[in-house]
Amino acid sequence: MLASSPRVLTGHQRNAEELGSYQKKIIGIDAHLGVALAGLAPDARVLSNFMRQQSMSSRLLYNRPVPIARVVNAIAGKAQVNTQHYGRRPYGVGLLVAGVDETGPHLWEFQPSGMVLEYRGAAIGARSQSARTYLERNFEGFEDASREELVLHGLRALRDSLAQDKELTTANVSLAIVGRDEQFKLYDGDEVADWLEKLGSTQSSRGSRGTAPAATTTAPTAEGSGDAAGDSMEVDA
């Protein structure tokens, strides 16, 4: 685990049609915690509200931020129950959970089955394998990377998951950063323009065609792959 690096989430947002708004892919939970999603946004809203309740309860009862592992295991148990009972369906959403607690920075992947795994870098969603490949090739340099370099790693991983004729723009990209000395902060719209300028080329370097991903995250400084980048990466279907 990285002892001091921040966590970064990057996400690729998409709209159903040209006249529609872009679907948000990163949700803030608390000052030390946030998630990137891939899948059904309404299910992500239910789970994120549950996580907020857990976080508020921890602050009210124990006067401390909820430990990341505890809140992740809480949603895992909630999701797993739905796989056991007739008349219930599994949640149709995957999450990348990024946060910092007293034990350090963390990045967890939540799966609809209730499975949770901790990563140094991860990607979920459509064509997330391309983002994972980038993270696997570069993760050894994350530990010594600066905050800016980690964000750029997340954006590059997200860029690699795009279709050939798509590119990253201020409208379809969002990112979030959280660290020991930095509260969870979501950058959206024009706020990501400087990061895209530092990235340089915003078009995919891959030659295959396909539909654009909806979310990304990478490892070390960012969390999420596909819909988030940094320490994790998420890509939406």
Image: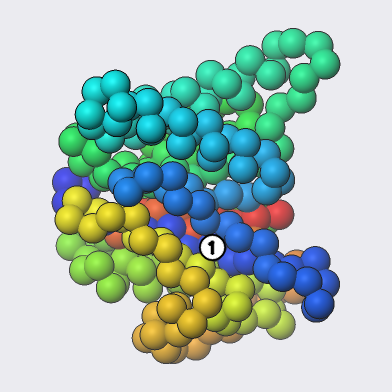
**Would you say 26 lies left or right of 230 here?**
right
**Would you say 4 lies left or right of 214 here?**
left
Q: In which quarter of the image is the N terminus?
A: top left
Give the image location of residue 20, x and y in percent: 78, 71
Q: Mark 1 points at which residue?
A: 11
Q: In this view, does 192 lie above or below 68?
A: below
In the figure, residue 155 lies in which quadrant? Answer: bottom left
Q: Which residue is at a point 17% across and 56% down the rendered structure image?
A: 181
Q: Is residue 18 above or below residue 53?
A: below
**Would you say 144 lies left or right of 52 here?**
left
The amino acid at mark 1 is Gly
Give the image location of residue 111, x and y in percent: 58, 34
Q: Quadrant of the C terminus?
A: bottom right
Label 1 neighbourhood size at 10 Å, few (<14), some (14-19), many (20+)? many
Q: Which residue is at a point 52% across and 77% down the rendered structure image?
A: 189
Of 193 and 164, the residue lying toward us: 193
Q: How was the colour assigned to the protein in this rendering?
A: rainbow
Element assignment for label 1: strand
- For the question of whether residue 229 can be seen, the reply is no
**Would you say 217 lies left or right of 17 here?**
left
Q: Which residue is at a point 43% across and 69% down the rendered structure image?
A: 187
Give the image location of residue 170, x and y in percent: 54, 80
Q: In this view, does 161 lie above or below 192?
A: above
Of 232 and 129, the residue lying toward us: 232
Give the image location of residue 78, x and y in percent: 57, 21
Of 220 and 133, the residue lying toward us: 220
